[in-house]
Image: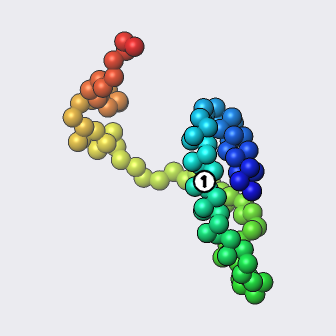
Amino acid sequence: MVRKIGDQIEQLARQASLAIVKDEQEQLVSQLSCMLEMLEPILELDSSGAEPTSCGVFHSVVCREDEVAPSLSLEQVFQNASSRDGDYFKVPQIASLEG
């Protein structure tokens, strides 16, 4: 099982374009192996009579029609703005255009 975990870590690292050195991989294998060992007793439990806690059925997204609702006027929107430029909020520059 340890070898399989190591192979899976290598595969995930490649897919995520991560460079993992051998020491890091060995540490991850060790940690994951310990976690899996702690979970092994759960696999031995008889859960045949237990009801599932989540539904395995896909639920479609329920969509609704867009409805026009009352909204704030521009003056109400901008009443607490510290600075405004026409119909836009004006905010201080926080990033430089120079790289």
Rendered residue at 40%/49% (across/down): 71
Quarter of image, res 80: top left
Q: Determine which quarter of the picture holds residue 7.
A: top right
Q: Can you say whether 93 is above or below 61 in the image?
A: above
Residue situated in front as seen by the camera: 55 or 78: 55
| Residue 25 seen in this snapshot | yes
Q: Residue furthest top?
A: 98
- How crowded pointer 1 is (Cα within 10 Å; few <14, some 14-19, many 20+) is rated as some
Left or right: residue 77 versus residue 27 is left
Q: Residue at x 67, y 76 (%)?
A: 41
Q: How far across and how far down the image is residue 99, in percent?
A: 39, 13
* Residue at (29% x, 29% y) in the render: 91
> Which of these two is toward me, 77 or 20?
20
How many numbered callouts? Answer: 1
Q: Which residue is mark 1?
A: 30
Residue at 55%, 53% (x, y): give it. 67
Q: Amino acid at mark 1?
A: Ser
> What percent of the width, then of the height, locates residue 57?
76, 67
Placement of the N terminus among the 4 image quadrants: bottom right
Q: At numbered mark 1, what does the secondary structure look like: helix, strand or loop?
A: helix
Whether residue 8 is visible, yes or no, is: no
- Which image quadrant is residue 90 in? top left
Q: Name the colouring of the figure.
A: rainbow
Q: Is residue 7 above or below residue 83?
A: below
Camera-side residue: 4 or 97? Answer: 4
- Give percent across and percent down for residue 88: 35, 30
- Residue 98 location in percent, x, y? 37, 12
